[in-house]
Image (cartoon, rainbow, N blue to C red):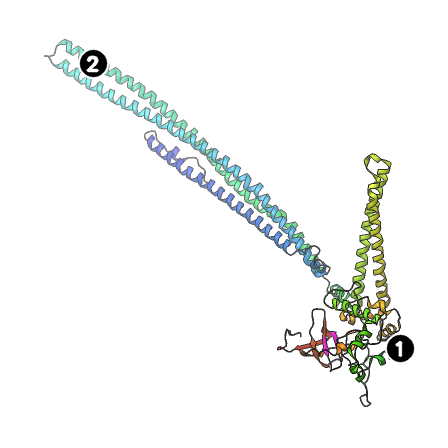
Amino acid sequence: MVSLPHPYVLHAAVSAPCLCCRKGKDQFDNLEKHTQWGIDVLEKYIKFVKERTEIELSYAKQLRNLSKKYQPKKNSKEEEEYRYTSTRAFLATLNEMNDYAGQHEVISENMTSLITGELTRYVQELKQERKSHFHDGRKAQQHIETCWKQLEASKRRFERDCKEADRAQQYFEKMDADINVTKADVEKARQQAQLRHQMAEDSKAEYSSTLQKFNNEQHEHYYTHIPNIFQKIQEMEERRIVRIGESMKTFAEVDRQVIPIIGKCLDEITKAAEAVDHKNDSQMVIEAFKSGFEPPGDIDFEDFTQPMKRTVSESSLSNSRGDGKSEPKFGSKSKGKLWPFIKKNKSPKQQKEPLSHRFNEFMTSKPKIHCFRSLKRGLSLKLGAGPEDFSNLPPEQRRKKLQQKVDELNRDIQKEMDQRDALTKMKDVYIKNPQMGDAASVDHRLAELGQNIEKLRLEVQKFEGWLAEVEGRLPARTEQSRRQSGVYEAQNPSGVNSCAQDRESPDGSYTEEQSQETEMKVPATDFDDEFDDEEPLPTIGTCKALYTFEGQNEGTISVAEGEMLYVIEEDKGDGWTRIRRNEDEEGYVPTSYVEVYLDKNAKGAMTYI
């Protein structure tokens, strides 16, 4: 900054004090404008920092909202997806972004407290100091101007008295030379001249004193008061400049202080990204979705050079099972006659028998009635209700579900036992201190907890039995064992109870779970043929078998890869499609095993590819 000592003061002359006063006033005006500009710059910088803090807060808020938006929801399917290393890395990124936002909030807080708040207080102090300095300067200017006016008045009075004395002297001399004037008039003129000379002398003395006083005041003003005031203004301005420089340095330091923490957040994101393991994720997918099925065995050679009967009757099927032989052929009918809408060939005798006789025979056949009820339950399963033992799932998936159920029941048992223990301790306290409560009041709740625990233990035993069944079967599950299981089903005499287990639905047929269940195979009564008399379902499209499927369970039909068949009922959301090979053979196959081409003109038809 240019030094403010005052060259115009050094060149001021006493002969022209009014010019000096005018110059001094002009300098004060210039300094006043300059210092006001400095305060405006400081306030502009404060406003800049304040807007920066608002931006930091807004940015931090947006980052937090972004992180919260993509956080997995609790108790949702998304939470399960975060077990993979890639999604865990993404979750770590979201958490680090939350910390990253926190550092921007720290920047805003520090700038507000260290810069905006401090400078705002300093500006108020600066304005007061500036006002005081310029007030002193104007007061000194007014004082010197007053002294100057007094000097001017004394000077004019002295000049006037000198002129009056000179005129009085001239008049006396004129009267003294005139012989016609009386002596008294001459004496009067002399006294008047002397009086005027005395007044001139007094004015001279006053003027001299006033001039000396003004010179002293002027010297003090231009060499002491004004330099001091200017020096204070200069120091005030320099402090303002230093302060704004320090604030700019603090502005940078506030950012620099959070850089290590922000760098740590970025390092954690990098570390999480480097922890992504594609092999591990792939293995987790395999473990999650592996079915446990054995690959299908070799397809038997069918010799068409010899006459073959592609459809077998109910009695021949039962005999083949009794002999321990169960070799499925592509195109064969489903084993057992539990689904009344599956047609079969009728004998002439059956066609001639009256309906009433066949109905009575059906009503007296109790095992058949029982299985018919189980058929209704199987249909309800097909409409969406899953079985309790998860038999509609592949073996590996079923094992996991059963294990989860067992763990869940064990946790429930532990909770009930903890409650029981707490109540038992409370009862002991009541017994020892009857004034604290009635011990008999908790007996009812203890009994309820005991019953709940017993029920849960029974449930655990049930699910552990199913789990042991699955785990004991998974290691070596071959095609031959699946075929032998069909023979065991036919020979097991406890089939009536097995019909009540709701396993006849095609929902679980492809899982081969039903091979472990037993079911009662009873001869078909003639009442079954009444279902056969119904009109066959119309064809709504065609399908091509993508894979070989062996219909081992009731209501299913075996197909060979590449075989073309007719679709008579589309998938209702349960994963099964009903197809027909010819007039006598129809059943269900998994929808994923066939490629369906529905007729667009068919009512309610949809295309599945």
In percent of width and height, residue 597 lies at 66, 78
Residue 475 visible to the viewer:
no
Q: Amino acid at mark 1?
A: Gly
Q: Secondary structure at mark 2?
A: helix
Work out which quarter of the rendered image holds the C terminus and state it: bottom right
Q: Left or right: where does residue 2 sit relative to residue 206?
A: right
Would you place residue 96 above or below residue 232 in this image?
below
Residue tagged 2: 192
Q: Compare marks 1 and 2 and give the one earlier in the sequence.
A: 2
Q: What crowding class fits label 2: few (fewer than 14 Cα within 10 Å), some (14-19), or many (20 or more)? A: some
- Depth check, front residue: 74 or 539: 539
Q: Residue at x 58, y 41 (%)?
A: 113
Q: Secondary structure at mark 1?
A: helix
The magenta segment is 578-589
Would you place residue 57 above or below residue 171 in this image?
below
- Depth check, front residue: 529 or 589: 529
- Depth check, front residue: 283 or 584: 584
Q: Left or right: where does residue 130 sit relative to residue 336?
A: left
- Say if mark 1 contacts mark 2, CB within 8 Å: no
Q: Left or right: where does residue 575 sit relative to residue 474?
A: left
Q: Amino acid at mark 2?
A: Gln
- Depth check, front residue: 538 or 17: 538
Q: Residue furthest bottom?
A: 305
Q: Residue furthest left?
A: 180
In percent of width and height, residue 26 lies at 37, 36
Residue tagged 1: 322
